[in-house]
Amino acid sequence: MEKETARIEAFSDGVFAIAVTLLVLELHVPEFNVGRNPATLIKTLISQWPAYIAFVISFFSIFIIWVNHHKVFKQIYKRNTGLMFANGFILFLVSLVSYPSALLARFYLSDAKQFSVTIYTGIFVLVNIAFNLLWQQATKDKSLLRPGISDQAIKQLRNNYLYGFPTYLIAFASSFFYPDAALLICILLWIYWAISSRKINFTSAPIT
């Protein structure tokens, strides 16, 4: 079967690359007058640690999203309008990640810490919904999928995204009271996705 999604994947990779690049813009170099004194420069750099944490978390969150996006599209060979719009929703959200990341970096040490974490975790609730929509669009018409994909693999991918939704909701709800715990939940879920996606067998079982 000829793969029809090459342009979708190329465009998507471009959006992911730009989204990752935008993250680094929040790492600000101190003013020259501050840097003239080594001790002051070191102190200033250390004081910016929320920006470093936000960058690392956001980079790897986008990376994990890209890995999952890549794995999904290895199983999708054809496209339809619903699939393209669902993919567009994912790309729209990925392009927004730099904004809540900037809020997190700037306000994490302020009284607005909880609100910045709430916005940050909220966008990943939407990302999870978008992935569920994408896989639902791809699997409701199995002719869009790669020949030979197993029903078990289809179910495993679906369950991965479905299980992620309540977890992200828990992180979002926790952010109103325990923002640090909410961020930790998101990080643990990304680690789980990175590990679990390697265990999925995408090939059909042999017929006996």
Image: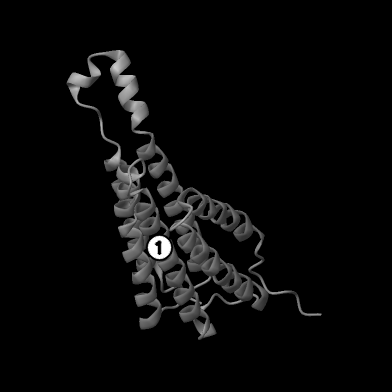
Amino acid type at image mark 1: Gly
**Residue at figure coordinates x 55%, y 64% from the top left:** 167
> In this orientation, does residue 70 appear?
no
Q: Is residue 144 left or right of residue 154?
A: left
Q: How is the image coloured?
A: one colour
Q: Is residue 79 left or right of residue 208?
A: left
Q: Tell which of 50 and 14 is nearer to you.
A: 50
Quadrant housing residue 175: bottom left
The residue depicted at 41 percent of the width and 49 percent of the height is 58
Q: Secondary structure at mark 1?
A: helix
Residue 21, percent from left and from top:
31, 46
Q: Toward the viewer: 112 or 17? A: 112
Percent across and percent down for residue 124 are 43, 61
Front residue of 64/84: it is 64
Query: Which percent across, then down, holds residue 132?
Result: 48, 73
Residue 206 lies in quadrant = bottom right
Answer few, some or many: residues within 10 Å of disc 1's Cα (few below 14, many 20 plus, some between 14 and 19). some
* Identity of the residue drawn at 51% across and 85% down: 140
Q: Image check: 175 left or right of 146?
A: left
In the displayed structure, 126 sits above or below 94; it is below
Instruction: Count numbered badges in the picture.
Output: 1
Residue 75 lies, in percent from the top left, at: 53, 70
Which residue lies most toward the right here? 208
Q: Is the residue 34 above or below the residue 29 in the image?
A: above
Up the image or down, 164 lies above or below 26; here it is: below
Looking at the rendered image, the quarter that the C terminus falls into is bottom right
Q: Is residue 15 in view?
A: yes
- The residue that label 1 is drawn on is 122
